[in-house]
Amino acid sequence: MNNDNETRNKLLLSAKKEFLEKGYAKASLRHICSEADVTTGAVYFFFKDKEGLFEAIVEEPLQKLMAVIKEHFSADRTEDFTTYVHKPGDHDDFAESLINVLYEDRDVVMLLLTQASGSKYENIIDQMIGMVDQNFGGLAEKYAKAKKVKVNKYMSHWLSHLSVMSFVHLLSHVESKEDALKYIKPMLEHIVMGWMNYAVE
């Protein structure tokens, strides 16, 4: 059992390095196995195939990220916009939770967001934008009804793109978790104010 765990972990470490260097599509199972000092049969035994190996690396960090986002969306949906008054710092707790999960295993999240072409995760950014857009759209309808205004669907959709790509840019360009925490709060404030001012008209 211990040998199985050791072999599996060696494969995961070797695969993570290979995927980060070459991306999913160009990564070589033969090279991964050679670096891990195991036969290619070990991949099929533990992970079934190349995609299963990639999934074993990225799925847990992805689920942690999705849980944080969904929890935030759930809290947003309970907001009473008839009495809501925005205050700077309203989203600081979410900002901190998001940075914690993004930077807990930053290189794996980067692998998922930037090196997944050819895998079943290759459209993950578009999927996230779609999820954010659905939430923003629902909130915009609720906010517009409370304020007796109309939803600007284009701006709501654009802000969904901006939100997701802002986090991808931050993760790509800021290595320090402490710096990321410093930058994400004004970023979120900008997005929230943009949403309140332009997602409705």
Image (spheres, rainbow, N blue to C red):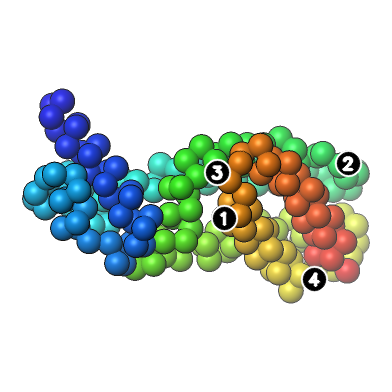
In what quadrant of the picture does the N terminus appear? top left
Foreground tag (1 vs 4): 1
Image disc number at residue 102: 3
- Residue 95 in sight: no
Image disc number at residue 152: 4
Do the residues bearing badges 2 and 3 touch, measured as CB atoms within 8 Å?
A: no
**Seen in the image, is 12 located left or right of residue 174?**
left
Q: Amino acid at mark 3?
A: Leu
Foreground tag (3 vs 1): 1
Which residue is at 44% across, 55% downward? 112
- Answer few, some or many: residues within 10 Å of disc 3's Cα (few below 14, many 20 plus, some between 14 and 19): many
Depth check: give the residue in front, 119 or 183.
183
- Residue 40 in sight: yes
Earlier in the chain: of badge 3 and badge 4, it is 3
Image disc number at residue 172: 1
**x and y percent of residue 136 in the render?**
70, 58
Q: Amino acid at mark 4?
A: Asn
Earlier in the chain: of badge 1 and badge 4, it is 4
| Distance CA(mark 1)–CA(mark 4) | 30 Å
Which residue is at 66% across, 58% downward? 166
| Distance CA(mark 3)–CA(mark 1) | 11 Å
Earlier in the chain: of badge 3 and badge 1, it is 3
SS at mark 4?
loop
Q: Which residue is mark 2?
A: 87
**x and y percent of residue 182 in the render?**
73, 41
Earlier in the chain: of badge 2 and badge 4, it is 2
